[in-house]
Amino acid sequence: MKFNLLEQQEILDFEKRIGFELEVNERANSMYGGRYYVHFPKGEIMEGGCLIGATGNGTTIDEALIAYCKEISGKRLAFNSYTCERREIEMPKLVHTKLLYK
């Protein structure tokens, strides 16, 4: 049997490799999906001819990172979409294993 599985990468290592920094934001009111949300500020998912903003939400930063990995894994992201520096990157299967808080 031959397995052709997606490459799995740690999101904190992947952000360094692609040169775009993740951003963690804290909400004053956690009614909107959790206390924290994480995203690539200049990155949008390319889907069906549209650009879609995505975030990972969680009650902790680690939960938000795990949620963001699920949201963008295996998708194509456009960075700096409406500029001459536009760059499109195919996301591998992302995971978050380097927990920030224990």
Image (tube, rainbow, N blue to C red):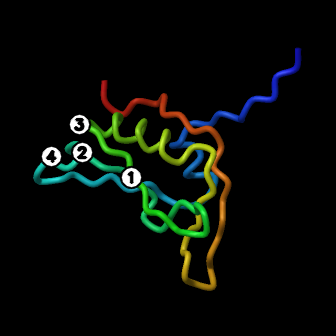
Task: Say whether marks 3 and 2 touch (CB < 8 Å).
Answer: no
Per the image, the residue denoted by label 4 is 30
Which amino acid lies under the numbered mark 2 shown in the image of this protein?
A: Gly
Q: What residue occupies the far bottom of the structure in this picture?
A: 84
* Residue at (23% x, 36% y) in the render: 59
> Horizontal placement of 101 versus 46: left or right?
left
- Count residues near mark 1 (Cα–Cα under 10 Å), then give few for <14, some for 14-19, many for 20+: many
Which amino acid lies under the numbered mark 1 shown in the image of this protein?
A: Thr
* Residue at (54% x, 74% y) in the render: 80
Per the image, the residue denoted by label 3 is 59
> Horizontal placement of 13 versus 55: left or right?
right
- Count residues near mark 4 (Cα–Cα under 10 Å), then give few for <14, some for 14-19, many for 20+: few
Report the Cα–Cα distance between label 3 and label 2: 8 Å
Which badge, 4 or 1, comes first in the chain's sequence?
Answer: 4
- Vertical order, 28 against 52 (above or below): above
- Secondary structure under tag 2 reads loop
Which amino acid lies under the numbered mark 3 shown in the image of this protein?
A: Thr
Report the Cα–Cα distance between label 4 and label 2: 6 Å
Task: Name the residue nearer the viewer: 55 or 50.
Answer: 50
- Count residues near mark 3 (Cα–Cα under 10 Å), then give few for <14, some for 14-19, many for 20+: some
Question: Where on the picture, by quarter, is residue 3?
Answer: top right
Task: Say whether marks 3 and 4 touch (CB < 8 Å).
Answer: yes
Per the image, the residue denoted by label 2 is 33
- Secondary structure under tag 3 reads loop
Report the Cα–Cα distance between label 1 and label 3: 13 Å
Per the image, the residue denoted by label 1 is 55
Residue 33's spot in the image, x, y percent? 24, 45
- Secondary structure under tag 1 reads loop
